[in-house]
Image (cartoon, helix red, strand yellow):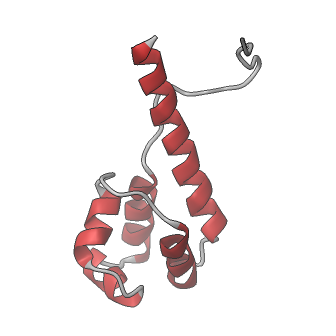
Amino acid sequence: MIDEIKNEYHPNIITHPGETLLDLLEEKGISQKEFAEQISLSEKLISEIIEGITGITLEIANRMERILAVPAGFWMKRQRLYDECIARNEKRKIV
């Protein structure tokens, strides 16, 4: 049996990176439609990311980096942390 890792902070809740994207778009005065056009993705997909329905892939993160000047690694780390939090919370429900 593997012991639980100690001395690590694992919040019970973390926001989807889509919320961060929405905040950044609002700060820069870019509409979701404009942003979708700039990164050659559908407005529906951008909306789904912002609503937390769809995750950010490496390809999307790279496109976002070019337009928003926020490193792709930042978006990938936000997505990974969100996914880990969701998985941890699901595991707690099962146990």
Asked whether 94 or 5 is in front, the reply is 94
Q: How many marks?
A: 0
Residue at horizontal 55 percent and vertical 38 percent from the top: 84
Return the x and y of residue 83 as percentages of the image width and height: 50, 43
Left or right position of 59 against 41:
right
Note whether 18 is above or below 26 in the view shown: above
Residue lying at the far front in this picture: please name it: 1
The residue shown at (43%, 63%) is 21
The correct choice, above or below, for 28 with respect to 57 in the image is below
Task: Give the percent coordinates (x, y) of residue 58.
Answer: 55, 69
Q: Position of residue 15 (x, y in %)?
A: 44, 43
Name the side, left or right, on which 68 lies relative to 45.
Answer: right
The quadrant the N terminus occupies is top right
Q: Is residue 6 left or right of residue 80?
A: right
Residue occupying the point 50% across, 43% down: 82
In front here: 59 or 14? Answer: 59
Q: Nearer the viewer, residue 34 or 53?
A: 53
Residue 77 position within the rendered picture, expressed as x and y whole percent measured from the top left: 62, 54
The image quarter in which residue 55 lies: bottom left
Camera-nearest residue between 71 and 91 = 91
Q: Which quadrant of the structure image shows residue 22?
A: bottom left
